[in-house]
Image (cartoon, helix red, strand yellow):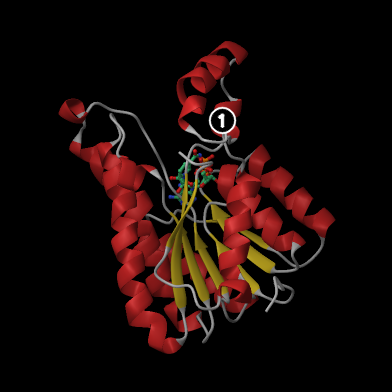
Amino acid sequence: MQLDLAGKNVLVTGGSRGIGRGIVLALARAGATVVTCYRSSGEAVDSLERELKNIGGDHRLVQADVSVPADVEQLIDVARTHLGRIDVLVNNAGVISHVPFAELPLEEWQRTLDNNLTGSFLVIQKALPLLPEGASVITVGSRAAVAGIPLRAHYTASKAGLIGLTRSLAKELGRRGIRVNLVAPGVIDTDEEGKLSDEERAAYAEKYQHMMALTRFGTPAEIAGAVLFLASSLSAYITGETIHVDGGM
Ligand SMILES: NC(=O)c1ccc[n+]([C@@H]2O[C@H](COP(=O)([O-])OP(=O)(O)OC[C@H]3O[C@@H](n4cnc5c(N)ncnc54)[C@H](OP(=O)(O)O)[C@@H]3O)[C@@H](O)[C@H]2O)c1
């Protein structure tokens, strides 16, 4: 058993920025062929395309919103044509917002559930015919799903739903040799935080860093480490699990 992902075919949702981008790049560097998707074109997509070209391999970037069934069909069509089979499926795309529960509009509740929970349902279900025996399905949840956080009831509810989805699918798909697991990040330093001013960033760090045993935020590459493990045969007997990657939160 080893971390040998050369020749593996991988689909990662939401790969243009943040954690998804870290996962895409780590998988491509490990020798996998990657199809990924995003919603908005722009510099993040262009630069990812350039980085993947430098790494080498025949990767594809597709504009597809995982909360829109027709887009998911189109994404899976590309995976079918380009990859044939999907050895590793990573459901990473997700959204977050901070709203007091009493003021949370139904539309925001639904948008969050559609992107974070229904998006994973749609992608996994449509991808099923392409998953061979031995495939690994990995979904990016959140440490917040079991911890709870004020102003994020909608987000944590959507991420907690992914735990149930993972547990049940592990049992339903296990007989096909398909493993289904969740990676639950703590606070990860992504592009979003990069948009903060130095002052805002320091205040953010002050507020949250003491919550981690390792007293720092994580990086997308550190989430990718857990994804690579779950994608490989090193984790061949692990299914239905949640791996918290949170620096000891
Ligand atoms: N960052 C953290 O601290 C943290 C902690 C716990 C869990 N997570 C989870 O990790 C995942 C990634 O988070 P992140 O912080 O890296 O987010 P991010 O920086 O906002 O990046 C999100 C990525 O997903 C794409 N995306 C979002 N919604 C999509 C959709 N409906 N369809 C297709 N692509 C979509 C975005 O593309 P566009 O720019 O085109 O929309 C972007 O490439 C999410 O599931 C999030 O809940 C993050």
At x 81%, y 57%, the residue is 55
- Give the left or right position of residue 16, taking residue 104 as reference: right
Q: Position of residue 31 (x, y in %)?
A: 75, 68
- Give the left or right position of residue 143, taking residue 132 as reference: left
In this view, the residue farthest toward the front is 213
Q: Is residue 160 above or below residue 103?
A: below
Whether residue 146 is visible = yes
- Give the left or right position of residue 16, taking residue 105 as reference: right
Task: Provide the residue designation for mark 1.
Answer: 215
Quarter of the image where the N terminus is located: bottom right
Q: Quadrant of residue 242?
A: bottom left
Say what amino acid the circle numbered 1 marks: Thr
Q: Is residue 107 above or below residue 113?
A: above
In the depicted view, which residue is nearer to us: 199 or 195?
A: 199
In this view, the residue farthest toward the top is 199
Q: Position of residue 25 (x, y in %)?
A: 70, 54
Whether residue 16 is visible = no
In the depicted view, which residue is nearer to us: 157 or 16?
A: 157
Instruction: Give the number of marks.
Output: 1
- Give the left or right position of residue 248, taking residue 175 as reference: right
Quarter of the image where the C terminus is located: top left
Q: Position of residue 133 (x, y in %)?
A: 51, 87
Report whether the residue tagged 1 is closer than 8 Å to ligand 1: no
Q: Quadrant of residue 191?
A: top right
Q: Quadrant of residue 170?
A: bottom left
Q: Position of residue 168 (x, y in %)?
A: 30, 72
SS type, badge 1: loop
In the depicted view, which residue is nearer to us: 234 or 191?
A: 234
In the depicted view, which residue is nearer to us: 179 or 124?
A: 179
